[in-house]
Image (cartoon, rainbow, N blue to C red):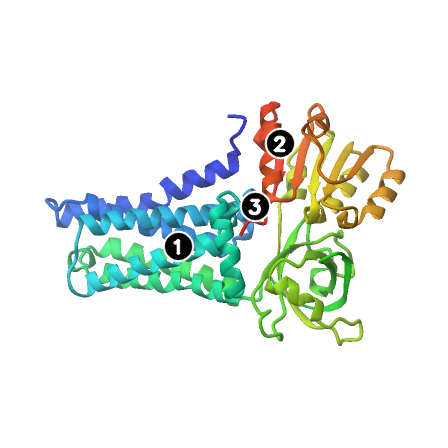
């Protein structure tokens, strides 16, 4: 039980079992009234698959309330796994209940489209998979050299076309369409999820306009962007990340997530430390900046994140141990500094490949000197397993950010030491 993250587990239980339940209850009730002798299991398989896919689509709309509960990385992982499960169940549904005419055409087209997009997405967008399976990781890097991220995002949106084909499929099945209560519920839920997606894509509710005021290289292959977003003054929590895009620059119009390295402030100045890994991040070097209105227009979506919320959920007297690696230090700096000001004891371990890649090292050293309740260890290269284990403190909570392999290794070490999953917070950018 110590390794179970209760909010994430409850989310899984809801999407797997609760989400299909009303569909199945209404279907079963109406079928018993109209078609008492009709075999229902193949139909139920199709309904379960559709309910799971609807849940996956809803998760892709990035509901903020759920982000603060389980984190956006966990939502994206559930979205991906749930989609694959839905496709597998859809295949069983089609095998056991062949259709004819428009129902067959739309059903087969949707299933094949789902499968093609799923395969493509598992290679190009499922970082939680590519970081664990080396072959897929190599294939992903090869694909990224040929296809821009914007192309992958648009291909992923073909899932919405497949969903529309499923709606046509259901309405084209005569004996299903005759079940009016079920069809009404089916259509209403589909419409609600569709509105959530439209709101996320086109609503300005959680999107904010800003200007790029500074754009500087602060380490090899790392740039710091300073963006002024007046409407986000004090509008995020420490350790949050946001999606940004440059709507006026070709090839940079799709949203990408990055963590803020600074704390919320009245000026609405957001600072991002960004490593040049992909086509979007490498193009940042040429984006113009300026404080007189000449800086590039930026659109910011969010913010998202769990680090500060995680600390708020735990006793403020408990100490904090921070494990940071490479660019992953970005969100942990403001969280650790805030925790220290609140009187928590903070132990901060930060490693990077080289001395030059230790971001904000001087700021961290000054913070350490001015803060007696903190410990700081900086390392060019890796900490040993013994050093990582020795950093644990009694009754502490743990914040981790860095490469995926590092996250998994430290989590495993903490679990072996008896630390509960609920006392560990990490947000892998594995998407």
Nearer to us of marks 1 and 2 is: 1
Of residue 299 and residue 159, the one placed in the foreground of this image is: 159
Q: Earlier in the sequence, mark 2 or mark 3?
A: 3
Q: Residue 276 location, x and y as percent? A: 66, 59
Of residue 378 and residue 17, the one placed in the foreground of this image is: 378
Residue 172 lies, with reference to residue 182, above or below; the image says below
Distance CA(mark 3)–CA(mark 1): 25 Å
Secondary structure beneath label 2: helix
Secondary structure beneath label 1: helix
Of residue 57 and residue 329, the one placed in the foreground of this image is: 329
Q: Residue 117 location, x and y as percent? A: 39, 59
Task: Find out whether the residues at labels 1 and 2 contact each other: C-beta distance under 8 Å.
Answer: no
Q: Residues within 10 Å of mark 3 (few under 14, many from 20)?
A: many
Secondary structure beneath label 3: loop
Q: Earlier in the sequence, mark 3 or mark 1?
A: 3
Image side of residue 162 versus residue 244, left or right: left
Give the labeled residue for mark 2: 423
Q: Residue 258 location, x and y as percent? A: 65, 56
Give the labeled residue for mark 3: 71
Disc number for residue 87: none
Q: Residues within 10 Å of mark 2 (few under 14, many from 20)?
A: many
Give the labeled residue for mark 1: 119
Q: Residue 364 location, x and y as percent? A: 82, 44
Which residue is drawn at the image coordinates 32% and 45% (left, top)? 22
């Amino acid at each position: 039980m110590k390794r179970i993250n209760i909010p994430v587990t409850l989310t899984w239980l809801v999407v797997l079992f609760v989400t299909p339940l009303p569909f199945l209850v209404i279907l079963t009730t109406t079928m018993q009234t109209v078609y008492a002798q009709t075999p229902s299991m193949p139909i139920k398989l199709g309904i379960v698959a559709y309910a799971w896919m609807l849940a996956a689509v809803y998760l892709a709309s990035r509901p903020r309330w759920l982000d603060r509960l389980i984190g956006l990385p966990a939502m994206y992982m559930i979205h991906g796994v749930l989609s694959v499960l839905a496709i597998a169940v859809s295949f069983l549904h089609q095998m056991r209940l062949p259709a004819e005419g428009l129902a067959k055409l739309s059903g087969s087209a949707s299933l094949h489209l789902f499968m093609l997009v799923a395969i493509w997405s598992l290679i190009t967008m499922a970082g939680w998979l590519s970081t664990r399976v080396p072959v897929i990781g190599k294939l992903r890097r090869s694909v990224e050299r040929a296809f821009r991220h914007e192309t992958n995002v648009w291909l992923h949106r073909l899932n919405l076309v497949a969903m529309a084909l499923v709606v046509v499929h259901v309405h084209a099945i005569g004996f299903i369409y005759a079940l009016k209560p079920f069809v009404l519920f089916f259509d209403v839920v589909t419409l609600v999820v569709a509105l959530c997606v439209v709101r996320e894509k086109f609503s300005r509710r959680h999107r904010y306009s800003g200007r790029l005021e500074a754009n500087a290289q602060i380490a090899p292959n790392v740039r710091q962007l300073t963006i002024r977003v007046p409407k986000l003054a004090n509008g995020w929590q420490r350790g949050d990340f946001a999606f940004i895009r440059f709507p006026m620059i070709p090839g940079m119009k799709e949203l990408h997530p990055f963590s803020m390295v600074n704390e919320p402030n009245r000026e609405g100045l957001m600072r991002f430390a960004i490593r040049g890994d992909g086509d979007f991040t490498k193009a940042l070097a040429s984006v113009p900046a300026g404080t007189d209105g000449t800086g590039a227009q930026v659109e910011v979506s969010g913010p998202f994140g769990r680090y500060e919320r995680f600390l708020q959920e735990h006793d403020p007297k408990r100490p904090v141990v921070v494990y940071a690696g490479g660019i992953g230090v970005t969100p942990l700096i403001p969280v650790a500094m805030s925790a220290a000001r609140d009187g928590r004891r903070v132990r901060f371990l930060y490693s990077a490949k080289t001395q030059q890649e230790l971001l904000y090292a001087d700021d961290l050293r000054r913070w350490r000197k001015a803060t007696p309740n903190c410990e700081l260890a900086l390392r060019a290269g890796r900490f040993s397993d013994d050093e990582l284990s020795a950093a644990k403190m009694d009754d502490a909570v743990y914040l981790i950010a860095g490469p995926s392999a590092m996250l998994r290794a430290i989590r495993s070490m903490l679990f072996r030491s008896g630390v509960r999953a609920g006392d560990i917070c990490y947000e892998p950018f594995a998407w």
